[in-house]
């Protein structure tokens, strides 16, 4: 039980990665605070968690929402041991040359707001609680931060920003708070949405037929399974736990061997 007696907040946990990680953390003994901007997702999760947990609507780009969430945590637990950031929006993997400058402008604001500012505000607001518990902050970046074509230019830039933020916050929050990240390659049961700025918010990663996604992934990765959100749970749980006495400022690249091949051959 990696997370026995831990209280763990997960942002963007209404579906996909955050939900899988929240379930994993609970199975490892944690009381979890499951939050998401999507109230309908939060409401639908009531039967999956119990009275030791909290399910809250929270838009991480809104200071008032984060403060409300913090008040609820202090009232119920009077402590917080880890914050796991998992929210995100995608850019549809579209090249910027195909869009107008106005669309690019709006796309930048939307994605940086959710994918970067949301993490930064969350870190800032919960830092005092994490400091008291000698806790951990775990942020989500992506293999897009390490190699081209994991997203379009704007999504990739947001994930690069998180990769750097992990290093800087580890420096600023040391020695009390350990700050690390995870860079997943793909998530089979993700509902990752496109951006409103390009009218793509009705599109979800889960719309891609599973076989097509699996075939694409198998053609470029060494490990031949398309991971589900829960498969990343152990990495997050370890980094969120007091068992991690040895890492801060690092990102675990959980890429199924994707980045290990410089040149693609027909088969391996
Ligand atoms: N899907 C992939 O293949 C993949 C690969 C690498 C990294 N990631 C990253 O993993 C993370 C989780 O994505 P996912 O694939 O599980 O998608 P997902 O859409 O299933 O989960 C993301 C959640 O974030 C929530 N969210 C969006 N804006 C928010 C806000 N302002 N405040 C609070 N919550 C908000 C959404 O409602 C959603 O429930 C993201 O950071 C994503 O960039 C995903």
Image: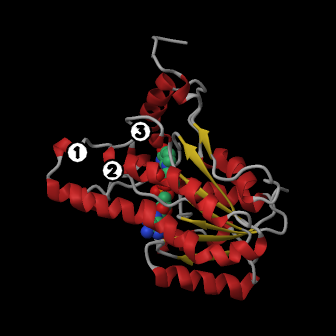
- Residues packed near mark 2 inside 10 Å, few (<14), some (14 to 19) or many (20 plus): many
**Residue at label 3?**
150
Q: Residue at x 48, y 72 (%)?
A: 60
Secondary structure of the residue carrying tag 2 is helix
Secondary structure of the residue carrying tag 1 is helix
The C terminus lies in which quarter of the figure? Answer: top right
Whether the residue carrying mark 3 lies under 8 Å from ligand 1 is answered with yes
Secondary structure of the residue carrying tag 3 is loop
**Residue at label 2?**
154
**Residue at label 1?**
96
Instruction: Report the side of 47 relative to 214 (left or right).
Output: right
What whole-number distance in Å separates the C-alpha atoms at marks 1 and 3? 14 Å
Residue 127: tell me if it is visible: yes
The N terminus lies in which quarter of the figure? Answer: bottom right
Q: Contact (CB < 8 A) between labels 1 and 2?
A: yes
- Depth check: give the residue in front, 178 or 206: 178
Relative vertical location of residue 162 with respect to residue 68 in this rendering, above or below: above
Q: Position of residue 72 (x, y in %)?
A: 64, 85
What whole-number distance in Å separates the C-alpha atoms at marks 1 and 2? 8 Å
Q: How is the image coloured?
A: secondary structure
What whole-number distance in Å separates the C-alpha atoms at marks 2 and 3? 11 Å
- Residues packed near mark 1 inside 10 Å, few (<14), some (14 to 19) or many (20 plus): some
- Depth check: give the residue in front, 62 or 145: 145
Q: Position of residue 178 (x, y in %)?
A: 70, 60
Earlier-in-chain disc, 1 versus 3: 1
Q: How many marks?
A: 3
């Amino acid at each position: 039980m990696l997370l026995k007696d831990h209280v763990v907040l997960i942002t963007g946990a209404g579906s996909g990665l955050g939900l899988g990680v929240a379930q994993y953390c609970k199975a490892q003994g944690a009381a979890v605070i499951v939050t998401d901007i999507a109230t309908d997702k939060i409401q639908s999760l009531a039967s999956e968690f119990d009275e030791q947990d909290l399910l809250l609507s929270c838009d991480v780009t809104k200071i008032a929402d984060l403060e409300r969430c913090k008040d609820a945590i202090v009232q119920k637990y009077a402590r917080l041991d880890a914050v796991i950031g998992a929210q995100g929006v995608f850019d549809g993997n579209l090249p910027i040359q195909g869009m107008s400058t106005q669309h690019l402008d709006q796309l930048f604001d939307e994605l940086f707001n959710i994918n970067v500012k949301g993490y930064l505000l969350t870190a800032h607001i919960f830092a005092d609680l994490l400091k008291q518990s000698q806790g951990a902050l775990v942020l989500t970046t992506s293999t897009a931060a390490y190699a081209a074509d994991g997203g379009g230019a704007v999504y990739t830039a947001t994930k690069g920003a998180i990769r750097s933020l992990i290093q800087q916050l580890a420096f600023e929050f040391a020695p009390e708070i350990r700050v690390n990240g995870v860079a997943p390659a793909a998530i089979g049961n993700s509902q990752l949405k496109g951006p409103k700025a390009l009218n793509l918010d009705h599109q979800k990663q889960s719309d891609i037929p599973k076989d097509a996604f699996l075939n694409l992934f198998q053609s470029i990765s060494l490990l031949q399974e398309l991971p589900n959100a829960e498969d990343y749970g152990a990495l997050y749980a370890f980094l969120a736990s007091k068992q991690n006495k040895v890492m801060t400022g690092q990102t675990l690249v959980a890429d199924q061997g994707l980045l290990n091949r410089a040149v693609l051959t027909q088969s391996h």
